[in-house]
Image (cartoon, helix red, strand yellow):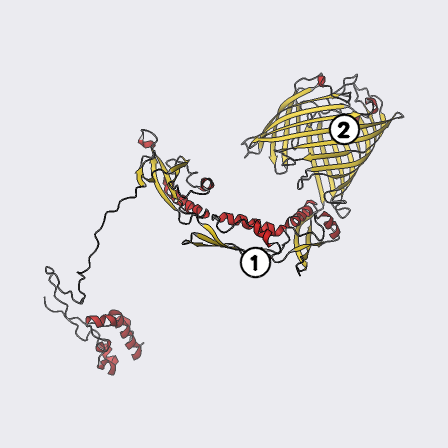
Amino acid sequence: MGARRRTRSLPHSTWSADAHSLPARLLAAACVIALVAPVSVQAQSGQPSLEELIPDSAVENPDAWADLGAEGEDLPDDPVVDPDTPMADPPGMDLAWPEDIELPPIEDVEAPEEVEFVDLEIAGPQVAFSGAEIIEISDDLVLGFPQREPPFGGRVDFIERFEALSTIRVLDTDDDNIAQLSARAREDEELLDNLLRVYGYYDGRVIRSIGSRDAGEDTASERPIVRFDIIPGERYRFGAIDLGSLSAAPDAEALRAAFEIQSGDFLQSDKIIEEQLDLDTALGETGYPFAEIDAPELLIDHEREEGDLTLPVTPNGKYVFGNVVSSDPDFLSSRHLGTIARFEPGDTFKRSLELDLRRAVTATGLVSTVTITPREVTPPSEGQPGVVDIDVALEQADLRTIAGAIGYGSEEGIRLQASWEHRNFFPPEGMLRIRGIAGTQEQLAGVTVRKNNFGGRDRILNIDAYASTIDSPAFEARTAALVATYERISTLLFQKPLSWSIGGELVATQERPPATNGVSQPRETYFIAAIPAYAQIDTTDDLLDPSEGFRLSGRLSPEVSRNRGVQSFYLRGRADASYYQELREGFVIAGRAAYGSIVGTDLRNIAPSRRLYAGGGGSVRGYGFREIGPRDDLGEPSGGRSVVEVGIEARIRTGFMDGAVAIVPFIDAGSVSTSVTPDFSEIKIGAGIGVRYYTGFGPIRVDVGVPLNPEEGDAPVAVYVSLGQAF
């Protein structure tokens, strides 16, 4: 082959006709050349230098030299290479072949003995560890645990968490979802890796394999299965623990004991969160309202197999309570709020008492929003705690309410109740209520004055004046009464283990037996004074719908009555007990028993409205209201001096309407006697079934009962509708 002549020129596209000066053109040329042939390569390959590529003529007249274009210095001819002859000395390369270097021979790598291919009831090949303990999570997911030493600490909890979070476990194994299995397997593998680190296994490994489980001779029925072999390795421990300036707190030793992580304990990241919350609670409950805890930092040292924990804690001083300060003293005064609070000035600050005050102010029903803020009055000094006042910012709510209720019983008829109230008519917390009842058997008009938190937290003074008429199967009555009580009772926000009340009653009533065949008997007038008292122990878990616990209550009312010139003294008493037990989720057994007695006088000296009766929706279902017991010569209930009641029901939640509906079979029994002790020979039994619809404010009850041993005049079926459980 003949020699070829080649020339190098700068591409014309690099330049414009008149836009560049001489220095710029020289610089561009130098850059292009430097890129094509670096100086270090020139030195080794013998290529011309930069000075040689730019002749003197280019320096003297650069424009003319640039216009030469492709005309330039000849380049060396390309070497002639024979493709059939190996090159002894490749052009441009002067490095000798390193023939004195010996490479080690390649050895065959054998698989570890503990790894083998087994099926484990899986048709397809799987990489698995022999002797691994297998945990089957679902039909298409198994876990293998080949590591025996060291033991996998916390493995049970580890598996439970994985079961709760696994995406494969909730996947339906069918043709539509098989394609998702691989993607979900990767998600579960990442989940297992994260869980291992949560439990302190930072060197752990998860080996994923996918195969198929043989479901029988029909190969078409083979099902995919994912297996994860988990090798946790060594579990890391806590190294150094830095809790910031906690040691500067006066209670440093007790506070440090609340943070139950020590150096050398096994590392578990969620344990850090738990103990951080415990420490925050301890600070808030021992006088540190301004304490701060920053986010924890965990530094893992793989060489030491430890994690150093830093939790910046700043106690910011210890304090005691000062005064409670209201933002609206004309509405709710600071003095009144101090009465509500469960702390006194000088008590050690506790965050729980601060939150309790907020709940108590909310429970008044007088505010729409409330904000409670500790404010430093005196800083800590010379080992003495500081003082914080509690600022209460209030925003008034709508204070007027109109309310209504409706009830129905097949033997009682309809009962409509309505009321209007102003909850702060007599500040602070002085309520005025006007109420009325219009029903088949009862009509009432009344006025109530109520003072909440009167003389102490959760104590209520209630004064009620009313006039009513009652036309029941047992008696007819026209009554005027003034009733005053001082009580401490449970509310929806504060269900109390002990409730009580004591009060006084002044009653004037005209009563007679019900008319029979249009014939009415003359009315008798009774003047009654009573001092009723009540107490209840409540261990249940819910005020309106209990599922656990019991209630035990008692009522005593010493009374004096004057009728037809005869003055009588007697004692009315009643005891009630109920018990609730959840046998399984959504299945509650509830039972009740009651006993009442009047001692001290004959039955005829007791006004019919003060006697004891049984029957109705809250007593023995299946019978009419107050229709169980002794009867007069005309066959009408006349009441008695003793009563006994028992009842049991099963509250069974259904899946209907997202579990809001329950079926309630029940059976009740009761007896009323004219003596001071019950007469069980006349016991009445009723049974039936009910429906409960659970709402946010309590269950709506519909019960249908039938009398199992009725008397003449008893209806074959009784229906009861109300809010709340029967007991």
Q: Is residue 82 above or below residue 432?
A: below
Q: Tag 1, which secondary structure?
A: loop
Between marks 1 and 2 in the image, the one whose residue lies nearer the viewer: 1
Residue 263: x, y in percent?
Answer: 49, 51
Residue 245 - label: 1
Label 1 or label 2, whichever comes before in sequence order:
1
The N terminus appears in which quarter of the rendering? bottom left
Label 1 and label 2: CA atoms lie apart by 62 Å
Residue 518: x, y in percent?
Answer: 80, 20
Q: Nearer the viewer, residue 336 or 516?
A: 336
Residue highlighted by disc 2: 573
Q: Nearer the viewer, residue 156 or 238?
A: 238
The C terminus appears in which quarter of the rendering? top right
Drawn side of residue 535 relative to residue 235, left or right: right
Where residue 615 sits, quadrant-wise, is top right
Residue 321 shows in this picture: yes
Residue 65: x, y in percent?
Answer: 23, 79
Residue 611 shows in this picture: no
Q: Nearer the viewer, residue 620 or 265?
A: 265
Where residue 721 sits, quadrant-wise, is top right
Mark 1 vs 2: CB contact within 8 A: no
Drawn side of residue 676 relative to residue 257, left or right: right
* Residue type highlighted by circle 1: Ser
Where residue 706 sits, quadrant-wise, is top right
Residue 710: x, y in percent?
Answer: 69, 17
Q: Tag 2, which secondary structure?
A: strand
* Residue type highlighted by circle 2: Gly
Residue lying furthest right in this view?
565
Residue 678 - label: none
Q: Is residue 58 above or below residue 320?
A: below
Residue at image position (68%, 29%) is 577
